[in-house]
Image (cartoon, rainbow, N blue to C red):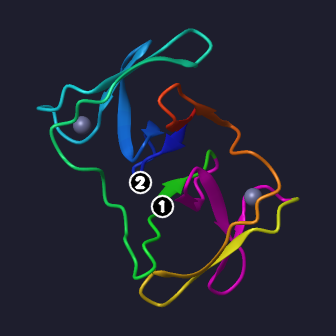
């Protein structure tokens, strides 16, 4: 589960975001014309994904190195950078550290918010992301 810039709960899945439409159903947040949806069970686990979106993925930033990321909000409302299923929290200056305190992975942003350095030596899996059968990740 992530927070939108406005503080709404969202599910991020393979670059698309979903907002809650009922207790167990989340629909694409992009446009009401898109019928893509995600269903979860009472435990919050994704049990069904319809990802037939009528539009491209949300604002991923593609840099010269081809690194895509998205700014998301942590449960506490802090900005985090999401890259390939890992989240990074702002450390000092232009460095962002892996949100897992025991992990040394980090990235660096330049003044234009492009990732200029990415150290992905994570020593842990992408939990609490759930890996779906089609290989995509969802964070609950
Ligand atoms: Zn959609
Ligand atoms: Zn890490």
Tell me the quarter of the image containing the C terminus. Answer: top right
Select label 1 or label 2 by which is in front.
1
Characterize the local packing of mark 1: few (<14), some (14-19) or many (20 or more) Cα atoms within 10 angstroms: some
* The disc label shown at residue 5, or none: 2
Q: Quadrant of residue 129?
A: top right
Identify which residue is drawn at 41% across, 54% down.
5
Characterize the local packing of mark 2: few (<14), some (14-19) or many (20 or more) Cα atoms within 10 angstroms: few
Dots 1, 2 in contact, CB < 8 A: yes
Identify which residue is drawn at 23% across, 42% down.
30
Beta carbon at label 2 within 8 Å of ligand 1: no
Residue highlighted by disc 1: 71
Whether residue 109 appears in magenta in the rendering, the answer is: no
Kind of element beneath mark 2 = loop
> Which contiguous range is marked in magenta?
76-101
**124 with respect to 107 (left or right):** right
Identify which residue is drawn at 17% across, 45% down.
55
Give x and y (percent) for residue 62.
37, 71
- From the viewer's side, name the closer residue of 7 and 122: 122
**35 with respect to 1 (left or right):** left
């Amino acid at each position: 589960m992530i927070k939108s810039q406005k503080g709404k709960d969202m599910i991020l899945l393979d670059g698309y975001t979903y907002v809650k439409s009922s207790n167990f159903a989340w629909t694409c947040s992009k446009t009401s014309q898109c019928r893509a949806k995600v269903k979860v069970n009472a435990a919050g686990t994704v049990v069904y994904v319809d990802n037939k979106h009528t539009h491209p993925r949300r604002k991923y930033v593609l840099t010269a190195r081809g690194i895509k990321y998205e700014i998301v909000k942590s449960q506490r409302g802090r900005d985090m950078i999401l890259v390939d299923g890992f989240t990074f929290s702002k450390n000092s200056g232009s460095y962002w550290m892996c949100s897992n305190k025991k992990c040394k992975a980090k990235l660096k942003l330049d003044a234009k918010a492009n990732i200029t350095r990415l150290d992905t030596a994570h020593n842990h899996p992408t939990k609490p992301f759930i890996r779906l059968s089609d290989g995509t990740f969802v964070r609950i």
